[in-house]
Each structure stands twice: as C-alpha cells, then as structure tokens.
Amino acid sequence: MMTKLRHLPIVFALLLPALSLPVRANREEEQERSERARVRPQYEIKLTIHFLTDGKRVSHKDYSIVLGNDNGGKIRTLKKVPVELQHLKIEYVETGVKCDAKYEIKEGGLELSIELVMSSFSETEGETIAKSSLHEVQCRVEANIVPGTPTVIARLDAPDSNAGYEIEVLATPVAVRQ
C-alpha cells in the first residue's frame, strides 16, 4: 500500500498539466475571438429590393443593417395575415421580408452571404381575411463585392406575371469611435 501512495505525487505531477490544457485552449480561443472582434471593421449593408415591371424598375424598398461580428445580422419586417382554412378556422401566416446576412473579408473586398425571403398575399381590396394566393420569393447568394460600389446580386422573375425583383447591395465602412 505504501508503495502505491509513494507514486501518487508523480501521477498528480503528470496529470495536472494535462488537465489544464483545455482551460488554456479555451482561454486562448476566447482571446483570439475578442481580438478579431476588436480589429474586424464594421460595415453598413444597405439592401435595396427593386420592384420590376416588364424588366424596368418601378419602385424599391431599402433595408439597412450594420455587421461587424462573427454572428452576422438579421432583418425582419413581418405582418401576420389571417387565413381562412376551413369552416370558421383561421390561421395566421407571416408575410413580409426576412433577411440574414454575414460577411468575410477577402482580398479586394468582401464576400457577402445573404439569405432573403419575401412573401405576400394578393389580397382583395378591403378584405380582412386573405383568400388569394401566397407569393414567396427566396434567394441565397454568396457574392464578392467591393465596398462603396452598389452591386446587383440577384434578379428574380415573379411566376405567372411580368413582375420581378432586382436585389442590390451596398457595403459602406462604419467609422468606429475610439
């Protein structure tokens, strides 16, 4: 028994540094992430959705978000529309715009990743419950863009009509206050 206990300090001496490795690694990863967050520049991403008729721009909507961390950002502008399913049963469906965005710094610019979903009902004027078709447009784009230069990243035609959409982005560096 005494022989086994005599080796115990040696075993602890060997195991103790190994047990602290994950803690050191986590601390180093956390410091590295913190450093990246401090030096990573922020960009305002302006997303413009141009509405097209016969291929020509007729109107647009602008959305803007500032990105600067590893998590990216989300834009949500939604409306819940009541939909009559069966006799007197109503369910609410979200319509509007959902956009998720993030970027990576690449040589000569940014690699912007955007996922966009737009949906709407073709409602009858004055109706409180939607009784028409749900229209949904989705796109996922990864594009290399140059900050300060407006870039069309997608052009989509609406099904069964002469309407369409053009998606344009503009990334502008945001001055960081010191």
Image (cartoon, helix red, strand yellow):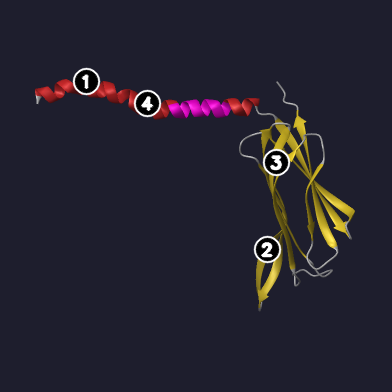
Mark 4 or mark 2: whose residue is earlier in sequence: 4
Residue 30 magenta? yes
User: How much space separates mark 4 and mark 3, taking CA atoms?
Assistant: 39 Å
Can you tell which mark lies on residue 20?
Answer: 4
Mark 2 or mark 3: whose residue is earlier in sequence: 2
Please state which of residues 85 and 71 is positioned toward the viewer in this rendering: 71
Residue 87 screen position, x and y as percent: 66, 79
Q: Secondary structure beneath disc 4?
A: helix
Provide the residue designation for mark 2: 93
Q: Which image quarter holds the C terminus?
A: top right
The answer to the question of whether label 2 and label 1 lie on touching residues, with beta carbons closer than 8 A, is no
The answer to the question of whether label 4 and label 3 lie on touching residues, with beta carbons closer than 8 A, is no
Mark 2 or mark 1: whose residue is earlier in sequence: 1
Which amino acid type is marked by label 4? Ser
Residue 95 screen position, x and y as percent: 72, 59
| Number of residues whose C-alpha sits closer than 10 Å to that of mark 2, classed few (under 14), some (14–19) or many (20 or more) | some
Provide the residue designation for mark 1: 9
User: How much space separates mark 1 and mark 4, taking CA atoms?
Assistant: 17 Å
Q: Which image quarter holds the N terminus?
A: top left
Can you tell which mark lies on residue 65?
Answer: none
The answer to the question of whether label 3 and label 1 lie on touching residues, with beta carbons closer than 8 A, is no
Disc nearest the viewer among 4 and 3: 3
Q: Secondary structure beneath disc 2?
A: strand
The residue drawn where x is 83% and y is 66% is: 161
Q: Residue furthest left?
A: 1
Q: Give the range drawn in magenta.
A: 25-34
Which amino acid type is marked by label 3? Leu
Residue 53 screen position, x and y as percent: 88, 59
Mark 1 or mark 4: whose residue is earlier in sequence: 1
Q: In this view, does 57 lie to the left or right of 73?
A: right
User: How much space separates mark 2 and mark 1, taking CA atoms?
Assistant: 66 Å
| Number of residues whose C-alpha sits closer than 10 Å to that of mark 3, classed few (under 14), some (14–19) or many (20 or more) | many
